[in-house]
Image (cartoon, helix red, strand yellow):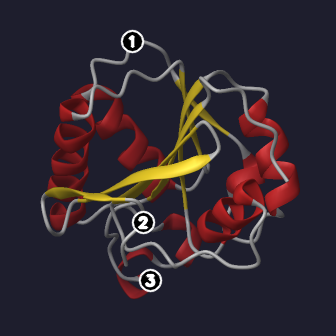
Amino acid sequence: MFRYDAVVRIYLIRHAEAVSEDEAGSDRDRWLSLRGREASRVLGRLLREQAVVPDVILSSPLPRAVQTAELLATSLDYLGTVTALRCLEPAAHPRVATAAISAAGSAVIVVTHEPVISAIGAFMLGIPAFPQFRTAQCCAIEGGKPTFTARADLGQILPLFVE
């Protein structure tokens, strides 16, 4: 289980909608669709309204995750660089990813994929399973508890984590 300081804030985010594997040529090379780019901007606006100010933004190195992270960074006026980590790729182990996240800062945005994003959420909270994320969805974990979810598809913030 992840150990929390009362001020640690982790924002787990699944990347926005990407083009099909047929269009990109492979799953690893998929980039954001136009709809995914817009959803990333909407999610960024929602996080800005919640006064999210990240110390660091971590991302899977796959293009769709990096692009989502960069659009969020722009929306949040984040001046640092987006750090891509292989431990956030789709098949990553949540224990390794969580160790990297915990070492990163006290307000960390993490942009990655299913199934690793829900596995990270479950591992951090010490529960057997976590609901799957939709694309361009954020679950905020503050002080060791889920506090809200931001859904770009709905354009709103919801309490706790709502599928």
Report the amino acid beneath label 2: Phe
34 or 12: nearer the eye? 12
Pointers 1 and 2 in contact (CB under 8 A)?
no
Q: Give the image location of residue 121, x and y in percent.
A: 64, 61
Mark 2 or 3 closer to N-term? 3
Instruction: Give the residue at mark 2.
Output: 161
Q: Name the residue under label 3.
A: 21
* Left or right of 65 on screen, residue 92: right
Assess disc 3: are there few (<14), some (14-19) or many (≥20) residues with their C-alpha within 10 Å of its C-alpha: few
Please say if 36 is above or below 80. Answer: below
Residue 87, horizontal then vertical, whole percent: 78, 51
Question: In this view, which residue lies farthest toward the top?
Answer: 79
Q: Where is residue 37 in the image (x, y as percent from the top left)?
A: 21, 54
Q: Residue 79 carries which label?
A: 1
Residue lying at the far bottom in this picture: please name it.
Answer: 22
Q: Which amino acid does label 1 sit on?
A: Leu
Q: Nearer the viewer, residue 157 or 43?
A: 157
From the viewer's perspective, is 161 left or right of 40? right
| C-alpha span from label 1 to label 3 | 32 Å
Distance from Cα at disc 2 to Cα at disc 3: 29 Å
- The vertical placement of 154 against 4, above or below, is below
The mark closer to the camera, 1 or 3, is: 1
Q: Residues within 10 Å of mark 2 (few under 14, many from 20)?
A: many
Please name the residue shown 23% across and 31% down the image.
Answer: 48
Q: What element carries label 3?
A: helix
The amino acid at mark 3 is: Glu
**What's the CA distance linking mark 1 and mark 2?**
28 Å
